[in-house]
Amino acid sequence: MGWHKQEIRLARKVLLRKIGNREEDRIMPAKKAASSGRGKVEKVMREYQEGSLKSGGKKPVRSRKQAVAIALSEARQSGARIPRKKGS
């Protein structure tokens, strides 16, 4: 299995974990909510793997965690129902 597939699986797992059980699940099931953002997450993680993902600057993103954060953020912007990270 390629390393990039592991990254995509991790991003999917994070996406599904963040959706979880909510009141809104009655309106839009978690699977449907996840599928709407899944394509965006895969695209961004592929960019990260290729080294073309940038976070506002000229340098490519090096951190896997930062890449996942960017992927979730872009999925939210495209309309996927992904809750914000709870502050500590």
Image (cartoon, rainbow, N blue to C red):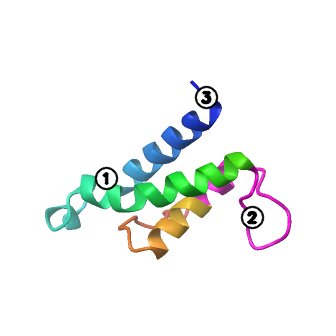
Q: Position of residue 32 (x, y in %)?
A: 25, 58
Residue on which disc 2 sits = 54
Which class describes the residues within 10 Å of circle 2: few (<14), some (14-19), or many (20+)? some
Camera-side mark, 3 or 1: 3
Q: Main secondary structure of the magenta part?
A: loop
Range of magenta residues: 51-69
Residue at 49%, 39% in the rendered image: 9
Residue at 82%, 72% in the rendered image: 57
Where 56 sits versus 86, above or below? below
Which class describes the residues within 10 Å of circle 1: few (<14), some (14-19), or many (20+)? some
Residue on which disc 3 sits = 2
What quarter of the picture does the C terminus occupy? bottom right
Q: Look at the numbered disc 1 and give the secondary structure of its residue.
A: loop
Name the outermost residue toward the top: 1
Name the quadrant containing residue 19. bottom left
Distance CA(mark 3)–CA(mark 2): 22 Å
Does the magenta run of residues contain 55?
yes
Distance CA(mark 3)–CA(mark 1): 28 Å
Q: Position of residue 12 (x, y in %)?
A: 45, 46
Name the outermost residue toward the left: 26
Residue on which disc 1 sits = 20
Marks 3 and 2, the one that precedes in the sequence: 3
Residue toward you, 27 or 79: 79
